Image: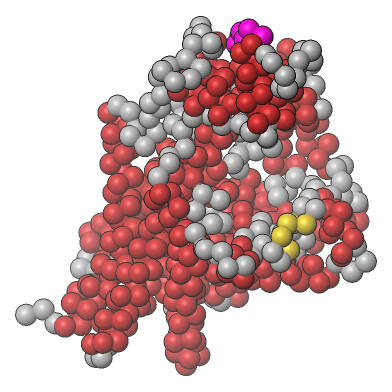
Amino acid sequence: MRELNVAGGRDERTRWRAAAHAYALLVAAGVAYCVARMPIQVSDCLGNLLQIQDVPLARVVADQMSARAYMRPLLWAQIKVVSDLSGGHYFAAFKTVHALQLFTLAVLFVRPLRIRTALDFAPLPLAMAVLVGLHTFSGTVREAFPINTFLTIVLCCVAAVNLSVSRPRAWIDAAAVLLLTFAVLTLESGVLVFVCLAAAWGVGFRGVSRTGIFACAAVIGVYLLARFAVLDVGAPGLTERPSGFGFEILEPSALAARFGDNPLPFYAYNVAASLLSLLFSEPRAGVFWAVRSAATGGTLPTWLVLNLVSSALATALIGWYVLVRAREVWHDGGSERDGLVAVAVAVVAANAAISFAYTKDVILSPAGVFYATAVYVAARELVIRTAALSNVPLRSAVAVLAVTGAMAWAVRDAAIHLNLRQWAFRERNQWAHVSEWLDEQGIRVTTPSQRALVAALQADALSRPVPAPARSRWIEWFDLN
Amino acid sequence: MVRPELTAARTCALAIALPPIVVTAIATAMLLLAAAGDHPFWSESRVTLADAAAEGDHALVLRMIRQGHDPNRGTGRHTPIEYALERSDTRLVRLLLAHGVVLDDKSRRDLACRAARQGGGEIYALLRDGRPWTCEGPP
């Protein structure tokens, strides 16, 4: 056991750390390659790009500060800056940003895990498979607006934890405040950055000082004051979009009819559904597909069974870890890795809570990444404790469960490549009908720069080689939703 | 002599690590192949406009038409618009009609009536386009 657990020397520690980063970057490269092959999408993207053409940056930001229901000035500022810097090479510019986001996520995900030995390295492939294979991740790579802001928030959350686990330095507090400000002005779920910082401080990470935490709390206070009292932006209502409920998706009118007088049950449902979705991959976007299928006597598709089994095993692993470590932590104090699990629990709970108005897989993407962190820590502990088991049948049973879970997650990991390929085909087809889409949306392309933008993006999309969706009975093993 | 607990730890570590490593190794191999030539998982193998229509590949159909391929030319079994009809793909039918598919009145009526039999009311309407015939009666 010691042979696996104890690093020989500085060189060996460096070697395992480098191996961990290299592995994570390889996984990111595989996903980034598929992202780079996908055309920029039409819906939720072309309209955004047209909107910022011929408008100065300051105006883009100012318009967002006076919007209703949403306040995302830096989201639009990022799109504007990248678009202007692209020099007309929109595809290259936005795809470069997306790929860089993925590589940064890989590095920031690995760093707090403190991988120094073979034992530390062993659970990393599983954790990366959970990170990439979890259903909350696909939305961060499949779509872009044309910058995927959900991935931006994921990065901000992981960066916050990286700051927290660093050695305390004067600039870290300032960086934490800037990061939080950037996140909340990009997307509403940016408040999760504060949850990461506060939870990390609460469990003993001191990279960000108490003063830094208070400063961040002040940022949240100012943000809420500005949003609700000064600018009167408010929050999205019930009738903004369709939402999953029970076994079906309800249209805004149905939501208003059912919950217009008292939305609290709907909000409670969304929080519970988000939490269950993270832990068990069911429901998805508020709809209990597997339960519905089972209740109506239908056959569950293989991918759905794999999702349920893999998530149940991973959640059970984390639950087991929390149970066995809770008493030890109570008596002997916790380790840095225990702290990471505690932060993960806080982020999962907070992410579910902020999904009260609307639940969707990609909104849960920050929690999904922290779930992968918790799986890493728990799997590492499992390896250590399995070695100490004297009961051979029990040891074998653990090994069988471990390999079952790892194989299921490997299939989910592989699904992301197929998912992106199918999505690319679908998105590229949209570009063949872009004029119709613009008419349907009531978007008028009037200025020469707008016309040039549409022409450039369409020409780029059509020229991109994308294979037809794969047709094989093996397809049903992969979650393409 | 290897201690039993070390073997157990190694077995458990391998059980957890190997499956995802295999997936990553395959993805990496494909990336390396892509660096040398075409990515095996992302290669676009269709060569004719009719093949593209048969796959429902609207983008490739439009690209090939813009490159000068004849949208009326079929391969073996069907023409592109017949493939679109076979797929009940209204948008592809509309795309082909808007980009140079020429149909004589008889072919148009045959296709429209076939669409109607398949339940493709929208395709029927697109093909008929106000012409003074119906699917009843002699052609």
Which residue is drawn at the image coordinates 79% and 12% (left, top)? Answer: B132
Q: Position of residue B91 (x, y in %)?
A: 65, 26
Region in magenta? B101-105
- Prevailing secondary structure of the magenta residues: loop
Q: Position of residue A12 (x, y in %)?
A: 23, 61
Describe residue A458's horizontal placement relative to residue A421 as left or right. Answer: right
Which residue is drawn at the image coordinates 62% and 56% (left, top)? Answer: A361
The reply to whether residue A91 is visible in this rendering is no
> Nearest the camera: A390 or B116?
B116
Describe residue A284's horizontal placement relative to residue A310 as left or right. Answer: right
Which residue is drawn at the image coordinates 78% and 24% (left, top)? Answer: A439
Position of residue B26 relative to residue A176, above or below, is above
Q: Residue furthest right?
A: A261
Position of residue A415 relative to residue B15, above or below, is above
Magenta highlight on residue A59: no
Q: Position of residue A304 (x, y in %)?
A: 50, 61
Which residue is drawn at the image coordinates 37% and 58% (left, top)? Answer: A410
Position of residue A245 relative to residue A231, above or below, is below
Residue A200 figure quarter:
bottom right
Q: Position of residue A349 (x, y in %)?
A: 64, 71
